Image (cartoon, grey):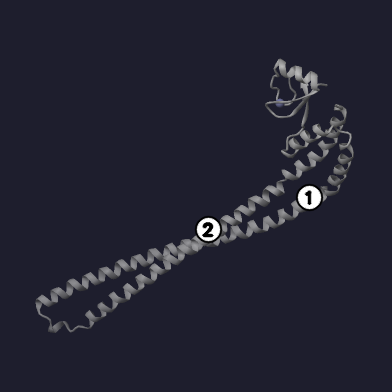
Amino acid sequence: MNLEKILAYQNLDSKLYKIEKQVRESENKKTVSKMHENMKNAQERSVKLEEKAGAILAEIDKIKQQYAVQENKMKEFMDKDLTVLSKAELEKYNVLKEKLSQNLNILDKNLSSLAETINGILADFNKTIKVFNSSRDEYLKSKENYENEVKGVEKEKQDLEKQLLLLEKDVDAQTLENYKKRRKENIFPVLVPLSGDSCGWCHVQLSYANISTLENDGILTCEHCHRIIYKK
Ligand SMILES: [Zn+2]
């Protein structure tokens, strides 16, 4: 097989790989997915906060009803003519009145505490909306930047792909297939020189048997990094 051809192919392909890597590892692309995640989390959070607020508002309603009931009872008591009551009745009256007043106090405290909780939820909700909005702004900006990045290299990529296609016909078909398989997995460089008696990429030492295969075939697949080792 003609090693020179596939090495020339790889040499040209390294330019394409570099462009692809640059786009793949773009900071804008990372920001796009990070902001998308932020937006999703903010949305989930606001749904949960709404549910929580709904439950608390229902609880407040319930307590308000209880409060109204107790308050009515209290009014009935207050309207009573105390002068007609016996001493025993008056004592009973005072105990009940005390109890009602305690109940109202408890309900009042519960209401205040729930109102505080609702305020906390509202503050959290406003914060979440702010996070969502700023994430969306950054998402849109980064998305546009990323799309421009992709567009910016499109022409160069297409030119390189055309040139590579021209070189392909000179390359041994089986070698090309092996090459492309690894390239798809973003293994690059695919072909690496033998370095002493080790793989030129991962430096794993080759056995005598492997070295002799390399001598015979001209190439050998590294068992460790799966690159194709060739002898210079
Ligand atoms: Zn290796």
Image quadrant assignment for residue 201:
top right
Counting residues from the N terminus, which is met first, the one under dot 2 or under dot 1? 2
Going 47% across and 63% down the picture, which residue do you hit? 51
- Left or right, 62 with reference to 171: left
Dot 2 lies on which element?
helix
Circle number at residue 45: 2
Give amino acid for label 1: Val
What is the quadrant of the N terminus in the image? Answer: top right
What is the quadrant of the C terminus in the image? Answer: top right
Q: Nearer the viewer, mark 2 or mark 1?
A: 1
Please say if 136 is above or below 212: below
Image quadrant assignment for residue 80:
bottom left
**Residue 196 makes an appearance in the image:** no
Quickly name the residue at label 1.
Answer: 150
- Left or right, 84 with reference to 106: left
- Left or right, 198 with reference to 153: left
